[in-house]
Structures are given as structure tokens and as C-alpha cells.
Image (spheres, rainbow, N blue to C red):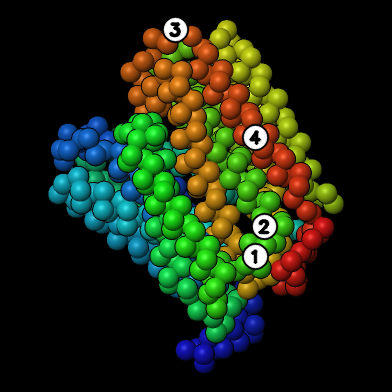
Amino acid sequence: MDQAVDKQAVAAASAPLTESEKNAIIGGVLLSMLLAALDQTIVAPAMPTIGRSLGHAEYLPWIVTGYLLTATAVAPLYGKISDVYGRRPTVYAAILIFLAGSLVSALAPNMFVLILGRAIQGAGGGGLFALTQTVVGDLVPPRERARYAAWFSGTWAVASVAGPLLGGTFAEHLHWSLIFWINIPLGFVAMAIINTPLKKLPIAAKNHSIDGLGALLLIVATALLLLALNWGGSAYPWMSPEVVGVLAGSALFWGAFALRLMRAAEPLISLEVLGNPIVLAGTLSMFLLQASSVGLAVYLPVYLQSILGLTASESGIAMLGLLLGTVGGAASSGRLIPRFTHYKRIAMVGVLFAILCMGLLAFVAGQASLLVVEVLTICIGLGTGTTFPVTTVSVQNAVDRMHLGVATGVLTFLRSLGSALGVAMLGAVALGFGLPLAGEGVAVAGHVASAQPFVMIFLVAAGTLGLGLITLTLMPEKELRGHVDDPAPILANS
């Protein structure tokens, strides 16, 4: 095994990647990421059809929850595995697991097998999210890495637009299983594209091992937390024995995981990485900013339908403003970062602008026209979009190559966890004011007497952005390395 690793490292050193090979790798991993992103958006329009076809419609939410649980829980694990065994085999494993889940889902004879298939898909898809950014971190120096943020945001934009369209079309005019069959040829195309050039990437951390017990504790703790967030306020009241019991179980496993990190000879997530002030503040700010952004994206369509009287399809089109604004903000931020010494200020100004626009949206929520709402949501997207390149580049720039996968995995993990928390948090606000959850919003379109629930939702989202701004302010800055192989001390400081 060691000889094979050495041969790979020698080969990588003697045959550096060409620009065309780098572009092929980036294109391949972005295609892989698109597959995972599509499967978070393509299923929702087809769920009624799937329920009629397979029965047990009361378990339909688990088609989404099953994917989310495993995708979030495994993200840090993939980062560590790729650091130890190399990017190519880990990317291949993630794609193959994702395709296996797609096959199980497409052939599912009943709802329970479909949920199992979705959980398998998530176990692969969660790795693809983390590994895509990690591979780009291998290829591009930190100073230039932010420019690729527009590619990531564009991939999410395509998934957000194309997913619902494809899901609805397949379910209505063809067959719902095509939602999953389409992944298989695309997955093999991605593998073919990245096969040869990925062989040239050296393994960053040789002679290291994976903490299996730590990985198991992390997965169980995360799954229980997400389960409680999913159940709370919908399936069960927040203070019900079921939700409180699951939260207590999650806390117990989180405590066991923390002890394992302190006592393991080689923990799953290095304490040096977790103790890095840039990593700590950067990942926490991403957690908070994502909670606000995703929570807003879930409840904005309910507002558009309930208060402004738009149909479901019209509200989907109106959501493009927020989406395109986010892509534009990320692209602009990515281009500006190499030109600024204090690049963190780009995100700080962007978040402050988003907070002001979110507050204004709350102020005018009861009497705003569609044009005003559209302009404000575009501005909110522009502001929040600036944060994604800054936090990603800051975290990756703060650690050396040996810990790049772990740091990126932790960032991806907290980003996904923030998404789940944001939906649950704003869902609690909605329920507190008598507003149905987002999934039930269409049923009450035009029947909400007051905009007050949405005023509070927008204010809570603005407050969460404010906490994210505070953590960004506290995050130290480190000069960006100009070359991909430049050394970076683990405990980087400003």
C-alpha cells in the first residue's frame, strides 16, 4: 500500500496537471455536484405522483428527510477519508454510492424501499458536496480559488431551476422513476471525465487512519439532531416526549463524540483544525448565514402566494430573483477577493446590506408590491452571496494541504446543518403565529388575514444574519497564499 502511495506521489510530481486536465477535473466534479444538488430539488414536484403510485403517502416527507439525514452526517467523514486515501478513490466511492441509491430508488416496489434508496443516495451525495470544493482547493491556489465560487453558485442555480421542472415533467408526462434513472448515465460520464487527470493528484496525508468509532458517533448524533428538527412542530410538538427524547439522545452522542475527539490517537476531525480561530469563526458564520438564507427561500414562496396572491408556478418564477442575486453576489465577491488585502470586508459589507434589505422587507411586508419584493430579494441574494467565496477560501487558506479535506468537510457539514436548523427555526415562528408549515402553504394561499407572521419570519432571518455578521467580524484574516502548494501553518492567525 505504501509503495503504491509513493508511486502515485512520484507520478503527480513528475507529471503536473495541464490546464485542460484541471478544467476536466473541475467540470467532472461540478457535474457530480450537480447530480447531488438536483436530487434535493427534483423530487418535490413528483411526490404526489409517487404517493399515489407506491402508497403510504404519510411517509412522503421521509423521501426528503432520508436524503438530508445521511448527506449531512457523512460530509466530515468524506473529507477525512479523502485526505488519507486520496481524492480519486473517494470521489469514485461517493459517485458509486450515489448511483447505487439511485438504482434502488428507481426500482423501489414500495415507499419504504424508496426511502432506503434515498438514504443511500444521501450517503453518496453528501460526499460529493464536500469533495467538489476540496478538489478545487487542490487544483487552484487560495488567491484565485474564489473565482470558482460562481461555478458552484451556478451549479446550485441550475439545480434549483431545472430540478422542479424535470421532476414535474417526468412525473406528469413520463414516469417518476426517471428522476432517478437519469442520474446513472450522468454519473458514469462524470467518472469518465475525471478518471485520468485525478490520478495525478497526490495523497495529502500518508500513513494515517480513519477513526471508525468517532465517525459512527458523529453520524448518529447528527441523524438524531436532524430527526428532532424535522419532527418538532410538525409531526410532534416541540416539548413532546418524542422530540425531547430524540434531542436528549443526540446530546448524549454529541458528548460521546467530543470525548472521542479528545482521547483518540488520531481523531476524525483534528483538534488543531477545530481550534483554528479562522476555521471556527468561518464555519460558524456559514452555519448562521445558511440558516437565514435557506429559511427565507423556504418561506418566501408561502408569502408570495398567501399575501401577494401568486400561484405556485408564479411564485417559483418570482424566486429566481433571490437565486440570481445570490449567484451574482458570489461571482462578484469571487472576482474581488484577489484584489483586496482585507477580503473579509467584502462579505461583511454584503451581509450588512442583506440585513438592511431584509429589515426593509419586514417593514413593507403588508403592503409591498411584487416589484418591490423582487428588488429587495435580489438585493438580499446579492448581499448573502458574497459570503460563500469568502468563508470557503478563508477556511481552506487557514489549513495546510494535509487537512484540506477535513476543513472543507466541516464547512460543508455546518452549512447543511444550518439549512436544516433555519427551516425548523422559521417553521417554529410560523406555527407560533398560526401559519402552516411551508409544505402546507399552498393550501392557505390567499387566506392569511395578516402579514404579521411573515414580518416576524423576516425579522428572525435578519437577526440570524446579524449573528453571522458578528462571527465574520471576529474571524481573523490571513494573507491568501498565491500558490496551491505554499505552506500554511495549522494555527494561522491574523
| Vertical order, 86 against 102 (above or below) | below
Q: Tell me, for residue 248, which label it has, or none.
A: none
Label 1 environment density (alpha carbons within 10 Å; few <14, some 14–19, many ≥20): many
User: For the image shown, how many numbered marks are present on the structure?
Assistant: 4
Alpha-carbon span between mark 3 and mark 4: 28 Å
Question: Label 3 amino acid?
Answer: Ala
Residue placed under numbered mark 3 in the picture? 449
Contact (Cβ within 8 Å) of mark 2 with mark 1:
yes
Q: Tell me, for residue 279, which label it has, or none.
A: 2
Alpha-carbon span between mark 2 and mark 3: 45 Å
**Dot 4: what SS?**
helix
- Using residue 53 as the reference point, say whether residue 459 is left or right of it: right
Q: Which callout, 3 or 1, points at the residue further toward the start of the chain?
A: 1
Label 2 environment density (alpha carbons within 10 Å; few <14, some 14–19, many ≥20): many
Contact (Cβ within 8 Å) of mark 4 with mark 2:
no
Residue name at image x 39 percent, y 58 percent: 220
- Using residue 357 as the reference point, say whether residue 113 is left or right of it: left
Alpha-carbon span between mark 4 and mark 2: 19 Å
- Using residue 451 as the reference point, say whether residue 100 is left or right of it: left
Res. 235 in view: yes
Residue name at image x 74 percent, y 66 percent: 491
Judge by depth and name the residue closer to the eye, 76 or 479: 76
Question: Label 2 amino acid?
Answer: Val
Q: Which callout, 2 or 3, points at the residue further toward the start of the chain?
A: 2
Alpha-carbon span between mark 4 and mark 1: 25 Å
Residue placed under numbered mark 4 in the picture? 465
- Using residue 207 as the reference point, say whether residue 140 is left or right of it: right
- The quadrant of the picture occupied by the C terminus is bottom right
From the top left corner, tell me how far across and down residue 307 is, in percent. Answer: 47, 12
Q: Which callout, 2 or 1, points at the residue further toward the start of the chain?
A: 1
